[in-house]
Amino acid sequence: MRDVTVVGVGMTRFGKFLDKGLKALGAEAIREALADAGIDQRQIEAAFVGNAMAGLITGQECIRGQVILRSLGLGGLPVYNMENACASASTALHTAWMAVAGGMYDVVLALGVEKLYDQEKRKSFTALGSAVDVEAAEEFRRQMSAELPAGGAEGAGETRSVFMDYYASEARQHMAKYGTRREDYALVAVKNHTNGSLNPKAQFQRARSLEEVLASPMIADPLTRLMCSPIGDGAAAAILCSAAFAPRFADARPVTVRASVLASGTPRMGRASSVVARAAQRAYEMGGVGPEEIDVAEVHDASAPAEIFLYEDLGFCKPGDGGRLIRDRLTSLAGRLPVNTSGGLLAKGHPVGATGIAQVVEVVGQLRARAGARQVGGAKVALTQNAGGVLDDEPAACAVHIFAV
Amino acid sequence: MRDVTVVGVGMTRFGKFLDKGLKALGAEAIREALADAGIDQRQIEAAFVGNAMAGLITGQECIRGQVILRSLGLGGLPVYNMENACASASTALHTAWMAVAGGMYDVVLALGVEKLYDQEKRKSFTALGSAVDVEAAEEFRRQMSAELPAGGAEGAGETRSVFMDYYASEARQHMAKYGTRREDYALVAVKNHTNGSLNPKAQFQRARSLEEVLASPMIADPLTRLMCSPIGDGAAAAILCSAAFAPRFADARPVTVRASVLASGTPRMGRASSVVARAAQRAYEMGGVGPEEIDVAEVHDASAPAEIFLYEDLGFCKPGDGGRLIRDRLTSLAGRLPVNTSGGLLAKGHPVGATGIAQVVEVVGQLRARAGARQVGGAKVALTQNAGGVLDDEPAACAVHIFAV
């Protein structure tokens, strides 16, 4: 298969935009990516469009990509509408990569877009709740509620995602098994909100203290509100092309895709066999790099504890050692391996079907040394990890990408 | 890119199955395809899953493929959830083809599945109505209603698809421009219901006379009920593998994919520039065959008039000559170019996200000379055409495949 490069990226600010629909959000990200690549949109040969929940929120259940692209004069392109819950954008990116690497197209667009806010807030949470086996969902909710410690059920109900119950359960297990502390989880939120304060595209741009994080309202013990990613609206886009084609975009400072892996979860036998660990292992093999060579990473911190589990699953440290990485500030901007320099899902925000490509926007900025106040000096190799849905206590989908300059 | 073959196909009967969900339907089609290929399911490396409307009908908006595959013990496979309205299955098939042709995988599963019937019938039509630009849909409906001749509005309202208004409008234009007759459209329905009567997987297995078709209730002038595809439930699956890998499945009688093209509609300047004509032209170039070499075809007869338009768009005859093909019985089972030998969408049924692969099930059967009472003697080259959604009076998505033995 051929080498593939990213030659342009763009994204909207993430946030609550009740006046903007899928078309307006998508168009803004695409225009920025086209301008960044210095490419005429007529050179684009196909579009891979990730979205998770427009059917339940806006009613646009079908042909989501065509509706968006037509408004930009890109209506004639073959459109691959992709879905993988919160990993929809990385699935679109991966499929776009596969199409170029395999020789089908030379220049393609990958877009992730999501409109989660609605006047009727309950719609958003119903949609988020569809990223499980809905036939079995009632049972899932019952199990999770039964596990919640007394008092932890505050804030429960239909106006929050069932995923926070899942993450809370995992967080309590990690505390019991490895001695991880509630403060470790809070430090992840502190770090990511600090990073978000430096990112003009972030939904939240205000640094938060450890005290503020711990004192914010309890969502599902031990998760306080500031340890949970918000819902949001937004879009992110990337232009991919074959490496042979990239020199035509001389100004674009192409970034090479070293690995692109998509995997699904199965019931696991411990951390090392998690879907994230399996996907990461294959990505390291495909990319010919190890975790010790990663200079900067964006990972799926849908909740603060998740980032700590991901340090372990991605091989950034040994199982159980995740809490130490955050305590020792190794993943802070000035640390050895900065993680979620964008602010992550916690602060940059999490319009679910846009997140996977927004991660790529951040690491491409880092690898091009254009990340401004968030720049990680000398970053040459970057990793992104994006997960979606839950089945069998595992993410249903997980994509890991490695990029290099 | 590498040659790709289809080594196994399977499908459920299409129909109304209120007691079967996506999992049961999908599992039945997959098991049949695996058995047909004589393959151990552990050899499958990835799954491409087409579905259009489960979010609005069953609530399973996300990770539709994972939920189905897990129930079969295929939970760990990378899953590409694909959507393109009524062309969702052919989009999944095309993407599966691209993945194998490009060298990413050797053996993959493509599945199309749809559950349209619900206790609450209105849900189905709301879902079908989401295959247009929903923001502009109100305007679309107004335009279509204004065009309906007096009396043609009988049966209109919220319990039928807006697409029948679209097709009726196109049918009236064809009559005015080319002298096509209401009876020509009815003959398509007669042919396809005759074919369906020979297909044990068809939703409707009863031959219909010209008089019956013309006398059935008017849906949107000139379309009577028997000229409109029904809604339905069903699933269809195909196993694809690289040609180099195919000899391992010695019993499978592999069928080669000669062309696989996906396109999107743009406002057209007449029939010759339609998205179908563009996709077909590219498929003929890719496959190195012309329309005169096609021995059997399955096309998207969502309404009876559509089949006549498709004869023209696919190059089976000159623009305006479609009515003659059906009058002269050239597309009947005993004709020169049998079309919709399965019964087509009109009689076999149209569970939208399953249709594109069900077409492949039929032509693979024909090319293997296993089509029973529907067998077309000596068929060596087959074409399938599947369309989805409507934007700018064109299908939003269209896939054309050519297969050969």
Image (spheres, coloured by chain):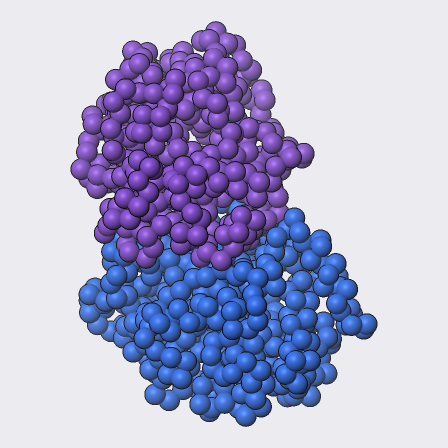
Chain colours: A blue, B purple
Q: Is residue A285 left or right of residue B318?
A: right
Picture quadrant where residue B159 is located: top right
Outermost right residue: A150
Q: Is residue A217 left or right of residue A116?
A: right
Q: Can residue B286 be seen here?
A: yes
In the rendered view, tell whether residue A319 sits above or below residue B9: below
| Residue positioned 28% across, 56% down in the render | B103
In the rendered view, tell whether residue B46 sits above or below residue B57: below
Q: Is residue A284 left or right of residue A54?
A: left
**Residue A389 position in % (x across, y down):** 56, 60
**Residue A149 position in % (x across, y down):** 78, 72
Q: Is residue A196 left or right of residue A150?
A: left
Picture quadrant where residue A304 is located: bottom right
| Residue positioned 81% across, 73% down in the render | A151
Q: Nearer the viewer, residue B168 or B284?
A: B284
**Which quadrant, please, contains the C terminus of chain A?**
bottom left
Q: Nearer the viewer, residue B90 or A29?
A: B90
In the rendered view, tell whether residue B161 sits above or below residue A4: above
**Residue B17 position in % (x across, y down):** 60, 31
**Residue B62 position in % (x across, y down):** 55, 53
